[in-house]
Amino acid sequence: MSTPPLLPATMRVFERGWLSANNVLFIDDASGETALVDTGYVTHAAQTEALVAAALAGRPLHRIVNTHLHSDHCGGNAALQARWHPRTAIPAAEAAAVSSWDQDALSFKATGQQCARFGFDAELHDGERLHLGGIDWEVVAAPGHDPHAVMLFAPSHRILISGDALWENGFGVIFPELDGESGFAEQAAVLERIETLDARIVIPGHGRVFDDVAGAVARAKGRLDYLQGDALRNATHAVRVLVKFKLLELQSVSRDALFAWMCGTPLMQRIHARFMAAQPVEAVFEQTLQALARAGALAVEGDRVVNRD
Protein backbone atom coordinates (compact mmCIF):
# COMPACT_ATOMS: atom_id res chain seq x y z
CA MET A 1 0.00 0.00 0.00
CA SER A 2 1.33 3.43 -0.90
CA THR A 3 2.06 5.99 1.82
CA PRO A 4 -0.64 8.69 2.06
CA PRO A 5 0.57 12.10 0.87
CA LEU A 6 1.61 14.40 3.69
CA LEU A 7 -0.67 17.33 4.48
CA PRO A 8 0.04 20.44 6.58
CA ALA A 9 -0.36 19.92 10.32
CA THR A 10 -3.38 22.25 10.36
CA MET A 11 -5.38 19.88 8.11
CA ARG A 12 -7.09 16.58 8.81
CA VAL A 13 -9.13 14.50 6.36
CA PHE A 14 -11.96 12.22 7.46
CA GLU A 15 -12.37 9.65 4.67
CA ARG A 16 -16.03 8.73 4.91
CA GLY A 17 -16.84 6.25 2.14
CA TRP A 18 -19.64 6.92 -0.35
CA LEU A 19 -22.82 7.77 1.57
CA SER A 20 -21.04 10.71 3.21
CA ALA A 21 -18.45 12.75 1.37
CA ASN A 22 -15.00 13.21 2.87
CA ASN A 23 -14.66 16.02 5.41
CA VAL A 24 -11.62 18.29 5.65
CA LEU A 25 -11.05 19.80 9.09
CA PHE A 26 -8.79 22.81 9.63
CA ILE A 27 -7.41 23.74 13.05
CA ASP A 28 -5.14 26.78 13.12
CA ASP A 29 -3.53 26.92 16.56
CA ALA A 30 -1.95 30.29 15.78
CA SER A 31 -5.25 32.06 15.22
CA GLY A 32 -7.55 29.65 17.03
CA GLU A 33 -9.74 29.41 13.91
CA THR A 34 -11.35 26.12 12.89
CA ALA A 35 -13.25 25.16 9.74
CA LEU A 36 -14.81 22.13 8.06
CA VAL A 37 -15.17 21.55 4.33
CA ASP A 38 -18.25 19.41 3.56
CA THR A 39 -20.35 17.68 6.20
CA GLY A 40 -21.59 14.29 4.96
CA TYR A 41 -25.09 12.82 4.68
CA VAL A 42 -27.89 13.60 7.13
CA THR A 43 -28.16 10.04 8.49
CA HIS A 44 -24.45 10.26 9.39
CA ALA A 45 -24.82 13.67 11.04
CA ALA A 46 -24.30 12.35 14.57
CA GLN A 47 -21.17 10.51 13.43
CA THR A 48 -19.90 13.63 11.67
CA GLU A 49 -20.50 15.69 14.78
CA ALA A 50 -18.67 13.13 16.93
CA LEU A 51 -15.67 12.99 14.57
CA VAL A 52 -15.40 16.77 14.49
CA ALA A 53 -15.88 17.18 18.24
CA ALA A 54 -13.20 14.59 19.02
CA ALA A 55 -10.70 16.29 16.72
CA LEU A 56 -11.52 19.77 17.99
CA ALA A 57 -10.90 18.60 21.58
CA GLY A 58 -13.02 21.29 23.19
CA ARG A 59 -12.59 24.01 20.58
CA PRO A 60 -15.65 25.37 18.79
CA LEU A 61 -16.20 24.96 15.05
CA HIS A 62 -16.07 28.42 13.50
CA ARG A 63 -16.77 27.80 9.81
CA ILE A 64 -18.37 25.38 7.36
CA VAL A 65 -17.54 25.52 3.65
CA ASN A 66 -19.54 23.42 1.16
CA THR A 67 -18.00 22.53 -2.21
CA HIS A 68 -21.53 21.94 -3.51
CA LEU A 69 -24.97 21.20 -2.16
CA HIS A 70 -25.58 17.57 -2.98
CA SER A 71 -26.97 15.74 0.03
CA ASP A 72 -23.77 13.81 0.82
CA HIS A 73 -21.77 17.04 1.09
CA CYS A 74 -24.09 19.24 3.16
CA GLY A 75 -26.28 16.80 5.10
CA GLY A 76 -24.47 17.48 8.37
CA ASN A 77 -24.75 21.27 8.11
CA ALA A 78 -27.87 21.56 10.24
CA ALA A 79 -26.54 19.42 13.10
CA LEU A 80 -23.19 21.22 13.19
CA GLN A 81 -24.94 24.60 13.06
CA ALA A 82 -27.18 23.61 15.95
CA ARG A 83 -24.18 22.69 18.11
CA TRP A 84 -21.56 25.33 17.26
CA HIS A 85 -23.32 28.04 15.19
CA PRO A 86 -20.48 28.21 12.65
CA ARG A 87 -20.46 30.70 9.80
CA THR A 88 -21.41 28.76 6.66
CA ALA A 89 -20.33 29.46 3.09
CA ILE A 90 -22.07 27.90 0.08
CA PRO A 91 -21.69 28.30 -3.71
CA ALA A 92 -23.20 31.66 -4.66
CA ALA A 93 -25.61 30.30 -7.26
CA GLU A 94 -27.40 28.24 -4.59
CA ALA A 95 -28.06 31.18 -2.25
CA ALA A 96 -31.63 31.94 -3.32
CA ALA A 97 -32.68 28.28 -3.24
CA VAL A 98 -31.25 27.75 0.24
CA SER A 99 -32.72 31.00 1.58
CA SER A 100 -36.23 29.92 0.56
CA TRP A 101 -35.48 26.19 0.88
CA ASP A 102 -36.83 25.71 -2.64
CA GLN A 103 -37.38 21.95 -2.91
CA ASP A 104 -37.59 22.11 -6.70
CA ALA A 105 -34.38 24.10 -7.16
CA LEU A 106 -32.36 22.05 -4.65
CA SER A 107 -31.36 18.50 -5.60
CA PHE A 108 -32.60 16.52 -2.60
CA LYS A 109 -36.22 15.97 -3.68
CA ALA A 110 -35.27 15.22 -7.28
CA THR A 111 -32.82 12.49 -6.29
CA GLY A 112 -35.01 10.93 -3.60
CA GLN A 113 -32.52 11.84 -0.87
CA GLN A 114 -32.71 13.72 2.43
CA CYS A 115 -31.21 16.88 3.85
CA ALA A 116 -32.16 18.80 7.00
CA ARG A 117 -32.73 22.50 6.37
CA PHE A 118 -29.75 24.74 7.06
CA GLY A 119 -28.80 28.37 6.65
CA PHE A 120 -25.74 30.21 5.38
CA ASP A 121 -23.81 33.41 6.02
CA ALA A 122 -21.54 33.76 2.99
CA GLU A 123 -21.37 32.95 -0.71
CA LEU A 124 -18.46 31.40 -2.60
CA HIS A 125 -17.47 33.00 -5.91
CA ASP A 126 -14.92 31.87 -8.48
CA GLY A 127 -11.61 33.59 -7.81
CA GLU A 128 -12.42 34.48 -4.21
CA ARG A 129 -9.79 33.79 -1.54
CA LEU A 130 -10.32 32.05 1.80
CA HIS A 131 -7.91 31.62 4.72
CA LEU A 132 -8.29 28.16 6.27
CA GLY A 133 -5.82 26.42 8.55
CA GLY A 134 -3.33 29.24 8.19
CA ILE A 135 -3.30 28.67 4.40
CA ASP A 136 -4.64 30.85 1.59
CA TRP A 137 -7.10 29.06 -0.69
CA GLU A 138 -8.58 30.09 -4.03
CA VAL A 139 -12.19 29.27 -4.88
CA VAL A 140 -12.27 27.59 -8.31
CA ALA A 141 -15.58 27.10 -10.14
CA ALA A 142 -16.11 23.43 -11.05
CA PRO A 143 -19.31 22.95 -13.09
CA GLY A 144 -19.93 19.54 -14.66
CA HIS A 145 -21.06 17.09 -12.00
CA ASP A 146 -22.98 19.97 -10.44
CA PRO A 147 -23.33 23.29 -12.28
CA HIS A 148 -22.73 25.32 -9.11
CA ALA A 149 -19.85 23.33 -7.57
CA VAL A 150 -16.54 24.81 -6.51
CA MET A 151 -13.12 23.47 -5.59
CA LEU A 152 -10.52 24.96 -3.23
CA PHE A 153 -6.88 25.29 -4.26
CA ALA A 154 -3.89 26.30 -2.11
CA PRO A 155 -1.15 27.57 -4.48
CA SER A 156 1.50 27.72 -1.75
CA HIS A 157 1.09 24.02 -0.95
CA ARG A 158 -0.34 22.91 -4.33
CA ILE A 159 -3.23 21.14 -2.61
CA LEU A 160 -6.61 20.81 -4.35
CA ILE A 161 -9.85 20.02 -2.51
CA SER A 162 -11.73 18.80 -5.57
CA GLY A 163 -15.16 17.78 -4.30
CA ASP A 164 -16.71 15.53 -6.96
CA ALA A 165 -14.97 17.21 -9.91
CA LEU A 166 -12.04 14.78 -9.72
CA TRP A 167 -11.56 11.50 -7.89
CA GLU A 168 -8.62 9.16 -8.11
CA ASN A 169 -10.65 7.15 -10.63
CA GLY A 170 -13.25 9.37 -12.21
CA PHE A 171 -15.71 12.00 -11.01
CA GLY A 172 -19.34 12.34 -9.97
CA VAL A 173 -22.33 11.70 -12.23
CA ILE A 174 -22.75 14.49 -14.80
CA PHE A 175 -26.23 15.43 -13.60
CA PRO A 176 -27.02 18.38 -15.94
CA GLU A 177 -26.89 16.11 -19.00
CA LEU A 178 -29.70 14.00 -17.52
CA ASP A 179 -32.07 16.95 -17.98
CA GLY A 180 -30.80 17.89 -21.41
CA GLU A 181 -28.48 20.63 -20.18
CA SER A 182 -24.77 20.94 -20.91
CA GLY A 183 -22.45 19.16 -18.48
CA PHE A 184 -19.90 17.15 -20.45
CA ALA A 185 -18.27 20.26 -21.94
CA GLU A 186 -18.10 21.88 -18.52
CA GLN A 187 -16.53 18.78 -16.97
CA ALA A 188 -13.93 18.72 -19.74
CA ALA A 189 -13.13 22.38 -19.06
CA VAL A 190 -12.78 21.69 -15.32
CA LEU A 191 -10.30 18.89 -15.99
CA GLU A 192 -8.32 21.26 -18.21
CA ARG A 193 -8.36 23.87 -15.46
CA ILE A 194 -7.14 21.35 -12.90
CA GLU A 195 -4.18 20.63 -15.16
CA THR A 196 -3.26 24.32 -15.20
CA LEU A 197 -3.27 24.45 -11.39
CA ASP A 198 -0.36 21.99 -11.20
CA ALA A 199 -1.68 20.48 -7.97
CA ARG A 200 0.63 18.20 -6.00
CA ILE A 201 -2.04 16.58 -3.80
CA VAL A 202 -5.78 16.11 -4.34
CA ILE A 203 -8.30 15.64 -1.54
CA PRO A 204 -11.34 14.25 -3.38
CA GLY A 205 -14.94 14.26 -2.25
CA HIS A 206 -14.81 10.46 -2.08
CA GLY A 207 -11.90 8.06 -1.79
CA ARG A 208 -8.39 8.46 -0.50
CA VAL A 209 -6.11 11.48 -0.75
CA PHE A 210 -3.79 11.00 -3.74
CA ASP A 211 -0.79 12.55 -5.43
CA ASP A 212 -0.84 11.01 -8.93
CA VAL A 213 -2.78 14.00 -10.19
CA ALA A 214 -1.77 13.63 -13.85
CA GLY A 215 -2.85 9.99 -13.82
CA ALA A 216 -6.19 10.82 -12.24
CA VAL A 217 -6.89 13.55 -14.79
CA ALA A 218 -6.00 11.19 -17.66
CA ARG A 219 -8.35 8.53 -16.28
CA ALA A 220 -11.09 11.12 -15.82
CA LYS A 221 -10.71 12.29 -19.40
CA GLY A 222 -11.00 8.73 -20.62
CA ARG A 223 -14.11 8.21 -18.52
CA LEU A 224 -15.63 11.42 -19.84
CA ASP A 225 -14.95 10.40 -23.44
CA TYR A 226 -16.71 7.10 -22.78
CA LEU A 227 -19.77 8.70 -21.21
CA GLN A 228 -20.28 11.39 -23.81
CA GLY A 229 -19.89 8.85 -26.60
CA ASP A 230 -23.45 7.67 -25.85
CA ALA A 231 -25.83 9.66 -23.63
CA LEU A 232 -27.48 6.42 -22.47
CA ARG A 233 -24.23 5.46 -20.72
CA ASN A 234 -24.39 8.48 -18.41
CA ALA A 235 -28.10 7.87 -17.78
CA THR A 236 -27.60 4.18 -16.97
CA HIS A 237 -24.69 5.02 -14.68
CA ALA A 238 -26.80 7.65 -12.91
CA VAL A 239 -29.64 5.21 -12.23
CA ARG A 240 -27.21 2.69 -10.76
CA VAL A 241 -25.52 5.32 -8.62
CA LEU A 242 -28.82 6.61 -7.25
CA VAL A 243 -30.05 3.10 -6.41
CA LYS A 244 -26.72 2.24 -4.76
CA PHE A 245 -26.84 5.47 -2.76
CA LYS A 246 -30.33 4.61 -1.49
CA LEU A 247 -29.06 1.19 -0.45
CA LEU A 248 -26.12 2.77 1.37
CA GLU A 249 -28.67 4.84 3.26
CA LEU A 250 -31.16 2.05 4.03
CA GLN A 251 -28.79 -0.99 4.00
CA SER A 252 -31.74 -3.35 3.49
CA VAL A 253 -35.10 -2.74 1.81
CA SER A 254 -37.87 -4.78 0.24
CA ARG A 255 -37.86 -5.04 -3.55
CA ASP A 256 -41.32 -3.49 -3.64
CA ALA A 257 -40.29 -0.51 -1.51
CA LEU A 258 -37.15 0.08 -3.58
CA PHE A 259 -39.15 -0.10 -6.80
CA ALA A 260 -41.73 2.31 -5.39
CA TRP A 261 -38.92 4.70 -4.43
CA MET A 262 -37.48 4.48 -7.93
CA CYS A 263 -40.86 5.14 -9.54
CA GLY A 264 -41.56 8.06 -7.20
CA THR A 265 -38.20 9.81 -7.54
CA PRO A 266 -38.51 12.78 -9.93
CA LEU A 267 -35.05 12.50 -11.48
CA MET A 268 -35.55 8.77 -12.08
CA GLN A 269 -38.83 9.58 -13.83
CA ARG A 270 -37.12 12.12 -16.05
CA ILE A 271 -34.23 9.78 -16.88
CA HIS A 272 -36.66 7.04 -17.88
CA ALA A 273 -38.74 9.37 -20.03
CA ARG A 274 -35.74 10.93 -21.75
CA PHE A 275 -33.41 7.96 -22.25
CA MET A 276 -35.22 4.68 -21.53
CA ALA A 277 -38.83 5.14 -22.59
CA ALA A 278 -38.64 2.15 -24.95
CA GLN A 279 -38.41 -0.13 -21.89
CA PRO A 280 -40.95 -0.45 -19.09
CA VAL A 281 -39.64 0.90 -15.80
CA GLU A 282 -39.92 -2.62 -14.33
CA ALA A 283 -37.31 -3.83 -16.84
CA VAL A 284 -34.98 -0.91 -16.03
CA PHE A 285 -35.33 -1.73 -12.33
CA GLU A 286 -34.49 -5.42 -12.85
CA GLN A 287 -31.54 -4.62 -15.10
CA THR A 288 -30.22 -2.18 -12.51
CA LEU A 289 -30.43 -4.75 -9.71
CA GLN A 290 -28.73 -7.36 -11.87
CA ALA A 291 -25.89 -5.01 -12.85
CA LEU A 292 -25.27 -3.94 -9.25
CA ALA A 293 -25.41 -7.55 -8.07
CA ARG A 294 -22.83 -8.59 -10.68
CA ALA A 295 -20.61 -5.76 -9.44
CA GLY A 296 -20.96 -6.97 -5.86
CA ALA A 297 -22.73 -3.78 -4.82
CA LEU A 298 -25.92 -5.49 -3.60
CA ALA A 299 -27.49 -8.88 -3.02
CA VAL A 300 -31.08 -9.95 -3.60
CA GLU A 301 -32.20 -12.16 -0.72
CA GLY A 302 -35.75 -13.34 -1.27
CA ASP A 303 -37.96 -10.28 -1.36
CA ARG A 304 -35.24 -8.00 0.04
CA VAL A 305 -32.39 -6.05 -1.53
CA VAL A 306 -29.35 -5.80 0.72
CA ASN A 307 -26.40 -3.45 0.40
CA ARG A 308 -22.95 -4.92 -0.14
CA ASP A 309 -19.79 -2.84 0.26
Image (cartoon, rainbow, N blue to C red):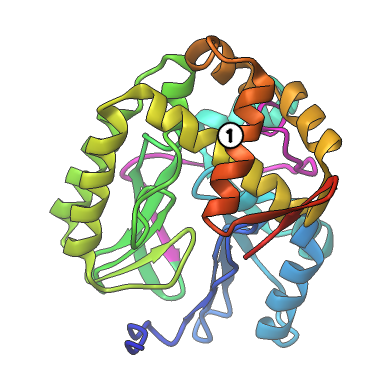
Query: Image quadrant of residue 239?
Result: top right
- On-image quarter of the N terminus: bottom left
Give the residue type that dot 1 points to. Gln
In the image, the segment drawn in magenta is: 107-131
- 225 to the left or right of 69: left
- On-image quarter of the C terminus: bottom right
Q: Could you say which is closer to the camera, residue 21 or residue 69?
A: 21
Q: Residue at x 56, y 40 (%)?
A: 240
Does residue 253 show up? yes
Residue 216's x, y, as percent?
25, 60
- Residue position for label 1: 287
Q: Residue at x 42, y 37 (%)?
A: 145
Main structural element of the magenta stretch: helix, strand or loop?
Answer: loop
Q: Residue at x 71, y 45 (%)?
A: 246
Secondary element at image label 1: helix
Query: Image quadrant of residue 43?
Result: bottom right
**Residue 279 to residue 161: above or below:** above
